[in-house]
Image: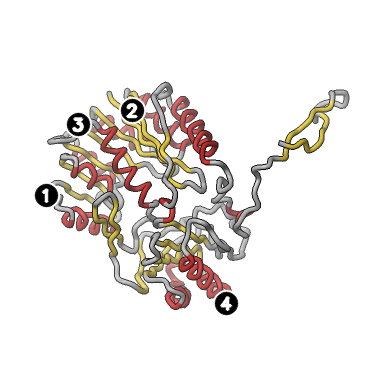
Amino acid sequence: MGKSGSQRAPDSDTAPMIESDRGDDRRAVPFCSAYQSCGGCRTQHVPAAMRIDRALQRVRGALKRGQAGGLELALQSPPPGAEKRSRVVLRVHGEGKALSSGLPAREQGIVAMDSCPATSERAIAVAKATVAAARAHQVPGLCAIAVHASGDGERVLVTLVADSSRVAHAQDLGRAAQAAGATHIAVNQTESQKRVLGRRSVPIAGAFPFVEVISGMRLRVPPSSPFEPTHWSAATLAADLVAVAGELAERKALVLRAGNGLTALALARAGATVAAIEDRPEIAHEAEGSGIDNGFGDAIAWSTEHHVEALAKLSGSRPDLVVVDAPNAGTDLARLAAIARLIAPPRIVLVARSTEALSRDLAGLADLGYRANAVRAHESDALSGDATVLVALVR
């Protein structure tokens, strides 16, 4: 580190001077023009060992705050090149709130990554062409654009997020993206600028659903499906879930927020009979199809009812395991209480992607009589330093 100077303590005119260290040879110039407003690749220059150590510190802190400290913990990191699969390579800010990028609503410009070591040249070309079209057409009601690309470059998926009354305008961007090499394009319709992602997507180009093969399982991806993590992260999540879930053969499991069905498939492949709840009908329909494609049609029962309503119906059929796939903001504590009261499972596995939400959810489950006895963590995004944490709790 280099010395950058000294300063006085702000609360005293007579305090001695104190030195501050600001320089660091490991600092790097951001490779993306959007870095100052996004910061999504904030760890791209950090050595892997330091990045992992910092992530471990965050996870340990969250476990301690959630009354689950002292558990043996290691953090898995993706091998070189693994992060090149199914990566979000572009976030565009239009009239509304930018999609998970941290851009404030007052910034009315459009930004795109200039380049990224984890993306293909084809995806970058699609991203730049879509941004250029967005600038040229000045699409009203546009909230965000996201581009996904497979590591081999065979598939480039563009999702446009737009006000539902302006979908026709967004189709101009879809045509530009397709001309640049996008293979699948959909417009996600949102009813409110405050809620960026809507409940329904309209395909513009490419056949939906397409199939992702993760950990040997075929997953159908409809246009309304949430953005996928990297293949390595998804496969690691499935393996970690089975590892902390305990004995699954001939056991009953319930999955809340089952999404594209990956967790339900992993449990069924390990021998469990699964009830999966996903309240978005289109995603649940394709996830059910994924179960059939993989030979687990009879082992997984799907429901699209509201979680609490479904829990009430399940109260007479107590599962051995409940998997709570928490959103980034954490699980509604009332829902956790409903799980404990209505079905009282002997084992819960919490899947968390935010350490702040993790500590809160763990504390809530501790108050309900559950104690953590196993934890697994892995990097969900090597460039941003985010971690996915799975904690098994017993009563």
Of all residues, the one furthest to the front in this rendering is 80
Quarter of the image for the N terminus: give it: top right
Mark 3, residues whose alpha carbon is within 10 Å: few (<14), some, or many (≥20)?
some
Disc 1 and disc 3: Cα gap in Å? 20 Å
Tag 2 secondary structure? strand
**Three-letter code, disc 3:** Glu
Q: Label 4, on which residue?
A: 136
Disc 4 and disc 2: Cα gap in Å? 53 Å
Residue 381: x and y in percent read 46, 47
Q: Label 1, on which residue?
A: 298
Q: Tell me which residue sits at (37%, 24%) in the image.
A: 367
Is residue 59 rendered to the left or right of residue 336?
right
Q: Is residue 376 above or below residue 225?
A: above
Q: Label 2, on which residue?
A: 374
Q: Label 3, on which residue?
A: 247
Residue 337: x and y in percent read 32, 32
Q: Quadrant location of residue 10? A: top right
**Three-letter code, disc 4:** Ala
Dot 4 or dot 2, earlier in sequence: 4
Tag 4 secondary structure? helix
Q: Tell me which residue sits at (31%, 30%) in the image.
A: 392
Q: Tell me which residue sits at (55%, 65%) in the image.
A: 94
Disc 4 and disc 1: Cα gap in Å? 51 Å
Dot 4 or dot 1, earlier in sequence: 4
